[in-house]
Image: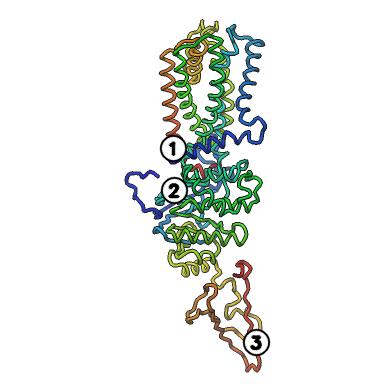
Amino acid sequence: MTRYRYLFGQLVRRELRRKYKGSTLGVLWYLINPLVLLGAYTLMFGHVVKVQSIHDFPLFLMNGLVVWTFFQQSLLSAAESLIDQGALVRKARFPREAIPGATVTVQLITFCALLVLLVPVTVAIRGTFGPALLLVPVLVALLYCFVLGCALIVAVLHAYFRDVVPILTAMLLPWFFLTPIFFDPRTIGFVQSNPFVGTLLEWINPVAPFIEALRAILYNGQAPDWGRLVYGFAAAGLAVLLGATIFRRMEGDLAVVV
Amino acid sequence: MSVQPGEVVLRDGEVVLRDATRSFSVRADQARTLKGLFLGRRAAGPAPVPALQGVTLHIEPGETVGMVGRNGAGKTSTLRVLAGIVPLQSGEAVCGGRIVSLLELGAGFSRDFSGRENILLQGALYGLNKAQIEQRLERIITFSELQGFIDVPVKTYSSGMFVRLGFSIAAHLDADVLLIDEVLAVGDEAFQRKCLRRISEQIAAGTTVVFVSHDAGAIERVCERVVVLDGGRIVFDGPTAEGLLHYHRLMGTEHGGGQSLRPDRDGPGEDHRNHVRVTELELRDALGRSTSFFHSGVPMQVHVGLRVPEEVSQGWLTLELLGGARRKPR
């Protein structure tokens, strides 16, 4: 496996540059797109359809949005990755995990770049500087493992069953609205009168605890509660384990199907 | 490559196929859908085509083996199985050391990236690290004769430049086992000769070579042993001259395509009494042994037996060699 470290690096570099090579702004597009999205959502959910009154709404929103964008973009690009790189898969024997892994890593780089912009701004405006910030890298690592595991599954499944991407696309939209990105489930009236809905929103959706933990640190200036951290560890571990197992079991015929 | 417990540890360059079996589904839409999965496994369609049916083959390090057979006999499948790209359904396929396949030369290049960057990526694909690739970089570039183009995106390359780069990379990875699939039709004739020379160098250095080709001449020059495949099975495994003979017999071209060289082919109903009849026809080698396969540059004796109805005072016997279009004169 270590033999292929250099291959992994090459694949990441190639993926990073492939999409925007030849365009003037190049890799900067990776940052511009989420920022435009942020502007649109701030306008939409902060002013047009105002769900709740939340202080510093763009910061609140951005906290959730960066995590969600990382999750969604990773899954969608990983799902197509094995087919896009079919020529490599058919050419030689190498750990094929490297291909979806590289696409997720490219998304991670974007995610980290956005955090580098977001964290100082949020901390400065919200005044949330404190030792809890040390947990941010831990959260990012856990999220990466979680997303990587999921990406391995959708990538190998989509290579065999081409319905996976349409299904995924259809799932991601309602999933986005049910994820506490632009609302805080605890302060919604309906949720307060029906506590189990809050539990569903906060714990069934595996993306939610990551968003809420990050938001606790950056936006509220508190350490995230232990439940969410443990959940993060469990989700990351389980996803990687499951992803690696399914990928190993199914990767055999990849060169035939892609 | 990690060695599983119970697996035989092979010497570098050793190749073992044991009872290798593999078939391929040939449905038009290769990709199955979830619907198909839920509704009774596989929908109606042609049965899977067996590509390999119990192929057993043992190649010693340093051997050069040619693989021949008609289209669909399982030659490329064998290579893909050996390269570890396609798994077997049953049986075992193991190679010792680094396996480099010259399959689909030039495939897997990133069109927007320069030749140099593609060399790095392709090298990495075979498990080389940065230092190992950079150490070979100059030799690869020189061999490919692409010095002037190495830093421009490969999408500007001609198809000949593509395969030249592909061959140059594969030929400089220090393979223990080199799998070559009908790729020597690379570039112009000078470059083809260079490729063959490079392969010969690697053979001299002890690389095991498995060589698939329809070009009997190339096989003859490169290989000492020939495996003839037919319908996914090995039908011959032995010395090259004999193997190629077997191959030609299989292809129905044992007389080099000269079907008209058969005695007594006169059809019925015609009055032949006044015609000259060919009663015997045989090709022999320099030692007078009957054969129908000849190496280039080797003497050939043609024995023709004729029956003539009456005494011929003056006659001509004309021999015409046809079908030379496939093989270029050397």
Task: Relative to A57, say whether B223 is above or below.
Answer: below
Q: Which mark is residue B88?
A: 2
For numbered disc 1, what is the local secondary structure? helix
For numbered disc 2, what is the local secondary structure? loop
Q: Earlier in the sequence, mark 2 or mark 3?
A: 2
- Find residue A2 and report its horizontal and vertical position in percent: 42, 38
Q: Residues within 10 Å of mark 2 (few under 14, many from 20)?
A: many
Instruction: Please state which of the two labelled residues, at mark 2 or mark 1, is closer to the viewer.
Output: 1
Which amino acid type is shown beneath numbered disc 2? Leu
The residue shown at (59%, 73%) is B259
**CA distance for labels 2 and 3:** 60 Å
The residue shown at (54%, 51%) is B140
Do discs 2 and 1 share a chain?
Answer: no
Q: Residues within 10 Å of mark 1 (few under 14, many from 20)?
A: some
- Find residue B319 and report its horizontal and vertical position in percent: 62, 80
Name the quadrant containing residue A241: top left
- Find residue B11 and report its horizontal and vertical position in percent: 36, 53
The residue shown at (65%, 89%) is B315
Task: Relative to B80, say whether A202 is above or below.
Answer: above
- Residue under numbered circle 3: B316
Asked if residue B201 lies left or right of residue A59, the reply is: left
Q: Residues within 10 Å of mark 3 (few under 14, many from 20)?
A: few
- Residue under numbered circle 1: A248
Asked if residue A149 lies left or right of residue A50, the reply is: left
| Whether residue A258 is visible | yes
| Whether residue B104 is visible | no
For numbered disc 3, what is the local secondary structure? loop
Which amino acid type is shown beneath numbered disc 1? Arg
Task: Relative to B18, say whether A83 is above or below.
Answer: above
Q: How is the image coloured?
A: rainbow
Which amino acid type is shown beneath numbered disc 3? Trp
Label 2 lies in what chain? B
